[in-house]
Structure formats: C-alpha cells, structure tokens
C-alpha cells in the first residue's frame, strides 16, 4: 500500500473529471484539494470543495469553514493541523455549478476511485459527517431518511461519529427550526473534540 504522501500526490494529479468539468458553466480544470495524513484523530467528511476552496486550495476556506470551526469549538490553527484533523470530502474537486448556480453534487467516480484507499490509511477516533453524501456513504441505510432525521438521531452514533448538517449559511433557517442541534448536539460534539485534542497533545508530549 502506498504511503499517504505518495497517495496525496497521486490524487492531486488526478484529471479523471477534466471532460466533465469542461462542460460546466465555469469550464474549470480539476484541482483536487487533499488534506490528510495518518495519525489524525479527527476526520471531517464533507461533500466537495466549493469555488472559494477551489481557488484557495485549502478545505473550508470560506464562511462555511468559519461556522464549522465554531460548531467544533476549535481555532483555525487546530482545524488545519493535519497531524490532528484530516479533511476528506466525498469528492476532492469543485464539481461546478448547475443551471441555478448551485454546486453540483460530488461525482461518484471520485469516491469510487480514491475513497477506499484513503480510508484504509486513516484510523480516526472521531468522525464528523457533514451533509447527506457523507452520511449515506459512511452510515448506509440509517442515513436514507435524510439529513434532518440522521442528525436528529446523532445519539445512535456518538461519541465516535457525529452527523452534521452542512455549515453553509443557507442552512441558518434549518438551525432556527431545530434548536436542539445547538443546545444538545454541539456541547457533546465540542466535548468529544476537546478530549481527542487533549489526548493528541498528551501523546505528542
């Protein structure tokens, strides 16, 4: 099995979706965004990079990232510390926009090509599943009822897995309709993350 540095370089050079992306409104070239290494105790599984992440080359380099870090109770430095946090979306490239200007879903070929190899190298102790695509891949049938039902059933998976809605600011109305997310789930999530970070620091020390 290849080491993660070589696997990361292999993913970064991937051009499988070049013809697909050339047909989108943005006509962009693939730019896989990889952010993982063995030993990270926390795994964040998102959907796919947006345009700002595509341009920055760093995951969650947008307002969604700010909100996600607030949910997690971590600093930007902690969030981007690959030794502690791996960020592995369901597709590594920005997929482009649909006719309404919304992000297209992650192309399945990305997960089919890379996901098993990446997951084989990671042994996270805590996994955050952000959005429906991540939840369906990792949880299977229990996630088929939809994101709201899956997140509402978070206790079925805690403390090692936490399903989350996407931290997009478009989901502000969802947060208002579901106040239990902030009052019940987030304190448990932050406590689980803090415990993993403490253990990582103790191990490193």
Image: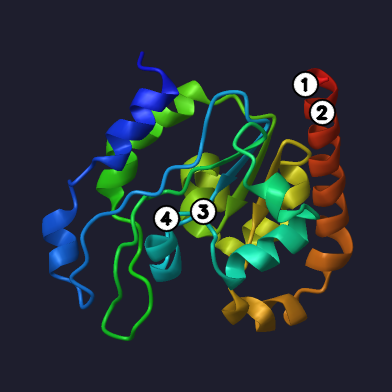
Label ID, residue 201: 2
Classify 10 Å Cα crowding around label 2: few (below 14), some (14-19), many (20 and above): few
**Residue drawn 51% across the image and 53% down it:** 46
Query: Crowding at label 3, few (<14), some or many (≥20) Cα neighbours within 10 Å?
Result: many
Residue hosting label 1: 204
Q: How far across and how far down the image is residue 161, in percent?
A: 68, 41
- Separation of disc 3 and disc 1 at Cα? 27 Å
Q: Which residue is mark 4?
A: 57
Residue under the point 87% across and 60% down: 184
Q: Which residue is mark 3?
A: 46
Q: Secondary structure at mark 1?
A: helix
Sequence-wise, which precedes: disc 1 or disc 4?
Answer: 4
* Neighbour tally class for label 1: few under 14, some 14-19, many 20 plus, Cα within 10 Å: few
Q: Quadrant of the C terminus?
A: top right
> Closer to the N terminus: mark 3 or mark 4?
3
- Residue at 55% from the left image edge and 68% from the top image edge: 62
Q: Is residue 179 left or right of residue 41?
A: right
Of callouts 4 and 2, the N-terminal one: 4
Contact, mark 3 vs mark 1 (Cβ under 8 Å): no
Relative side of 168 to 121, left or right: right
* Residue 19 position in % (x across, y down): 11, 58
For the residues labelled 4 and 2, the Cα–Cα distance comes to 27 Å
Q: Are marks 2 and 1 in contact (CB under 8 Å)?
A: yes
């Amino acid at each position: 099995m290849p080491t993660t540095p070589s696997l990361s370089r292999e993913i970064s050079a991937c051009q499988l979706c070049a013809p697909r992306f050339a047909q989108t409104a943005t006509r962009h070239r693939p730019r896989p965004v990889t952010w993982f290494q063995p030993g990270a105790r926390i795994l964040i599984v998102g959907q796919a990079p947006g345009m700002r992440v595509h341009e920055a080359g760093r995951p969650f380099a947008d307002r969604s990232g700010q909100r996600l870090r607030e949910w997690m109770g971590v600093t930007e430095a902690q969030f981007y510390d690959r030794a502690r946090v791996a960020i592995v979306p369901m597709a590594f490239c920005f997929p482009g926009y649909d006719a309404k200007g919304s992000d297209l879903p992650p192309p399945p070929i990305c997960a089919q090509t890379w996901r098993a190899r990446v997951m084989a190298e990671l042994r996270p102790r805590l996994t955050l599943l952000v959005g429906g695509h991540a939840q369906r891949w990792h949880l299977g049938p229990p996630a088929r009822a939809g994101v709201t039902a899956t997140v509402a059933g978070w206790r079925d998976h805690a403390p090692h897995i936490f399903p989350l809605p996407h931290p997009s600011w478009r989901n502000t109305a969802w947060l208002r309709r579901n106040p239990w997310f902030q009052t019940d789930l987030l304190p448990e999530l932050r406590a689980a993350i803090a415990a993993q970070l403490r253990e990582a620091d103790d191990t490193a020390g």
